[in-house]
Image: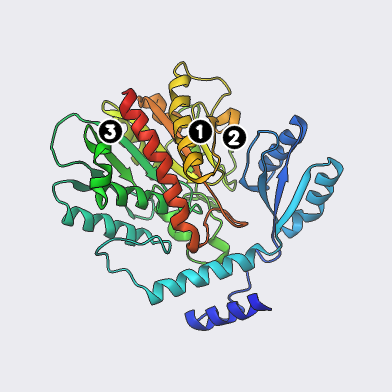
Amino acid sequence: MLRAVVLLLISVAVGLTVGELDHGYKGYHIYEVTPKTLEQSQLLHQLSLDGYDFIKEGRLLGHSSRVIVSPAQFERFVKLVKSEQIAYTLLNENLGASIDEELALLKLQRRMNPITGKGRLSTERYYTHEEILNYIDDLAVRYPSRVFVKTVGWSYERRALKTITITNGDQRKGKKLIFVDGGFHAREWISPAAVLYIIDQLVEQFEQNADLLKDYDWIILPVVNPDGYEHTQTGTLARMWRKTRQPYGACYGADPNRNFDFHWNEEGASSSACADTYAGPTAFSEPETIVVRDLMHSLSDRGVMYLTLHSYGNYLLYPWGWTSDLPDTWEDLDEVARTGAEAIENATGTVYTYGSSTNVLYIAAGASDDYGFYAGFNVSITMELSGAGSIGFNPPVTRIDEFVTETWIGIRAMAEKIIEKY
């Protein structure tokens, strides 16, 4: 009853009808499943390849995964987990209603608190791609000796992709650098939010973090996939969109994190244009991944660390993602990831699992972290941020600050370790 009243109040405030709040993903469930045997883990992974949308997946025994189950999949799914004695818990019995509430609140916040593009951004809501670009453009105006913004390419739908270069203003040539990006997967809203917090700490809170900029520059691409990111904010049916938005026949988009030309379209990627993990018709078919590729190669002579922020699951992952084999320098990668995980746990109690992508999470060929390492970065890490609630990609706005602050603790510790080692 209370939820219905809240929905009604929000719908009136933002000009939506009750009918508009009750469509798309109606009756979709989210289950948490926890494998206890290798066979159960393999079975769950097979489900992810058979069209089940795993919004959190891990291969370690005892680690839970979360899966969206449509009404059409419900009977088969429940029968399967029961027969295989896989532990499962219903987390959300109506994903559509949860998304409706979230989008209505987002629209209300934007109407009540429009962003001018001037000054600091708070951690009290999620921002549009345009608002993010306006923010970094304003930083370049306010801090002209330390901040530089550059348009490095365009998305398929002609949205600008801009990097922000953050320095300490000493104008030294050839400084080492850390390259950070976010927003690869459209529905992972907390990723750009965490990137914005990194920018805030390095620019607005420069005095507290000057040591991170003494011998290193930071180059940050806040949203790799702006078309998909904006699409997820247009309505309930679009909210769980993951890919880019370039059309392929009757379907749209490729998974940008399967589109890199390093073991492209091998295991963990799909050749089906309608699949969430579609690798694209060719490697680098997406203009967005071409931008990241070109940045990596242009920066690799100075680039020491590549960090890409995703959500969710509390992981710090390093190469390889295309094979369970480890690179020759895996101990260096492990040391950096472990440093970040320990810093977060010591400060907040939150536990991050760290290790190579395939051995800790799942095999995923053609990903950006593997390519960054292949392109020459000494350390390449994917950080899967914490999640909250049953959807996870977008912690409630009341918890954004908690999660981005936690994330920064780990990133700062990893950066300090990089500076110490390299």
- Whole-angstrom CA distance, mark 2 to mark 1, is 8 Å
Regarding residue 308, the answer to whether it shows in the image is yes
- Amino acid type, residue under disc 1 in the picture: Leu
> Badge 3: how crowded within 10 Å, few (<14), some, or many (20+)?
many
Residue at image point 59% right, 78% down: 6
Q: Which residue is mark 2?
A: 361
**Residue 363 appears at what percent x and percent y?**
59, 31
Pick whichever, 138 or 259, lies toward us: 138
- Whole-angstrom CA distance, mark 3 to mark 2, is 28 Å
Tell me the quadrant of the picture where the C terminus can be found: top left
Q: Residue lying farthest bottom?
A: 12
Residue at image point 58% right, 76% down: 20
Q: Which residue is mark 1?
A: 317
**Residue 191 appears at what percent x and percent y?**
44, 50
**Residue 416 appears at what percent x and percent y?**
34, 33
Tell me the quadrant of the picture where the N terminus can be found: bottom right
Mark 1: secondary structure: strand
Residue at image point 57% right, 70% down: 101
Q: Which residue is mark 3?
A: 177
Residue at image point 37% right, 73% down: 113
163 is higher (above) or lower (below) than 141:
above
Verify CB contact (< 8 Å) between mark 2 and mark 1: yes
